[in-house]
Image: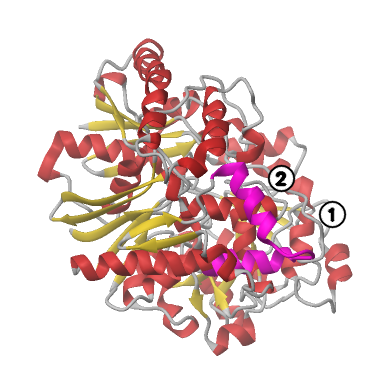
Amino acid sequence: MRFLGITDGQTSGAAIIENGRILAAINEERIVRIKMARGFPWQSIREVMRLSDTGPEDIAAVGVAQIDMQLREEITGWPGWFEARDETTSIHNLFFRTASRFGSLVPRIPGLKNAYYTLRTPVYSGRRRRIREIVQAEFGIRAPVHFIHHHYAHATSAYYTSEKTDALVMTLDGGGDGHCSHVYSVRDGEFEKLVEVDSYDSLGNYYAYVTAICGFKAKRHEGKITGLAAFGEPIYRDLLGAMIDTEDGRLVNRGRVLFNKAMDEITRRLPEGWKREDLAASVQVVAEDVTRRFVAHWVERTGHRHVAVAGGLFANVRINQEVQELPGVESVFVHPGMSDEGLAVGAALAVAEEAEGSRLRPSSLPSVYLGPAYDDEDVRRALGENELDGEHYPGTIEEEVARRLAEGRVVARFTGRMEYGPRALGNRSILYQPNDPSVNDWLNELLHRTEFMPFAPSVLWERAADLFDISEGAYDTARFMTMTFDCSDFMKRNCGGVVHVDGTARPQLVREVENPSYWRIIKRYEELTGVPVVINTSFNIHEEPIVMSPSDAIRAFLDSRLDFLAVGDFLVEGPSSSDEVRRKWEGKSVWGRAVETPSDA
């Protein structure tokens, strides 16, 4: 049986699964070319049905992530959390402002939270009715439509792709369906819910508040805070730790504030002249502390040695390292679509679980190359439309890419099926040699980005133990660039472009069986240079999604002055070179501008 999963909120998308295997998954942003596109995923549904050759009659059930939410039939961009609250016509944001105003009263007035959620229920019921109508009228799907709790969808996405039949499954994010976390003990496929944490007590929200206070867009640019944290000192740790904490296996909002009132209160408590890198360092340390204690409580309580996680907080690769290093934890699996882009997969798995019962078993993800692919004719057409010539290297393109990388050139790579999730993992990636410490400055300038995280390394699976302090239980999740690890001396000596100032890196471990073409590039690069590592950053330009089609790739390539484009089996030399920008950064301190440059968020 086949099952369709849909998510129609922030980063909307769709997925098709069969026998627990993901056949296709894509997010609307890649198709419509709007970063973090939100709304009903019209095109994603059509695309996953096309990719998997699924007709409406093949679908046994539809799972829609999230029970209570406002329906947006049109697709719009995600402006940022606090920017979105200014959309005064939105019912959602009316509730946002109400919760902000009365949040401090929650501990003093029993039943206030329940009254708030009860008030919202009838407002959102129209969405459920309308989605059922759309699924049948627009897509011809007559299968039953089920609405899945936001956090249960996260939990099923983590468990059923983790390979472990027994696991502690935890979700953590800003909030969804009134909760910010669920904790499950799962044994042989039986989910036992141990705790649910109200969104009022959200750790993810506090991280978002700091993101906004530092001048970035909340629920969009938290990764910038994670990178910026390494440049500061956690001198406001006690200030933030007094506001969000954990107690008896639950999160606790000790600050008793929400949303804009929380931002006002944090700002009021900060001393005059505070620095954003120190505030970033403080919220990062507090988030690590709280998550570590939260997870450790349930590891000890359940006796589970394997942990599977999903939810936006687990996009934080440093937090994931802290969880992996907890005493008693043998393995941690972070679902590769850990934030809301993974909810469609989770919703599909949830309805499949209900329909198939014990026949649905957890398994390791073979790969996340689950989007569209394009053939040579598609590539030739796109090159011709842009009046570009490319050398054709059928069967030897990997040799050509590796040689250019060894020569110090930047190569944008577009090949095969597009990746699912937020990370580019070799098929829609920009590649470069890893030994240039200034690359974060000059390459981000070429790509019109402002980032504080170093670029990630793609490394040969076989060499991981020589490069990182990595436990056996982290190998599987490290295929998807979901966790940092302490770097070896070899990495620090030879790979300055990917080692962060705190001595860590967030690698992608590349297996030959999973992506043989990409593996061959790295292997050949090692033969040429002695280093089994290449820089991998996503193939996109500032504030755009990762490229999907050959035309997207060519446009991004020409906009960013990269040296070469490897598109399919074609290699195109850029009309201009990266040399001028690189020379400007020669001899500069690593990311010297990172803290000083005002935010352009």
Q: Secondary structure at mark 1?
A: loop
Residue 344 relative to residue 459: left or right: left
Q: Residue at x 40, y 24 (%)?
A: 119
User: How are the colours assigned in the image?
Assistant: secondary structure
> Where is residue 279 shown, x and y percent of the image?
66, 65
Task: Residue 576: give its label.
Answer: 1
Q: Which quadrant of the rendered structure holds the N terminus?
A: top left
Residue 464 relative to residue 222: left or right: left
Q: In this rendering, is residue 60 above or below 295?
A: above
User: Marks 1/2: CA distance?
Assistant: 13 Å
The part of the image, by quadrant, that contains residue 206 is bottom right
Please state which of the two labelled residues, at mark 1 or mark 2, is closer to the viewer.
Answer: 2
Q: Are marks 1 and 2 in contact (CB under 8 Å)?
A: no
Identity of the amino acid at label 2? Ala
Q: In this rendering, is residue 492 above or below 413?
A: below
The magenta stretch is 258-285
Q: Which residue is mark 2?
A: 556
Q: Secondary structure at mark 2?
A: helix
* Residue 348 shows in this picture: yes
Determine if the magenta segment contains residue 1: no
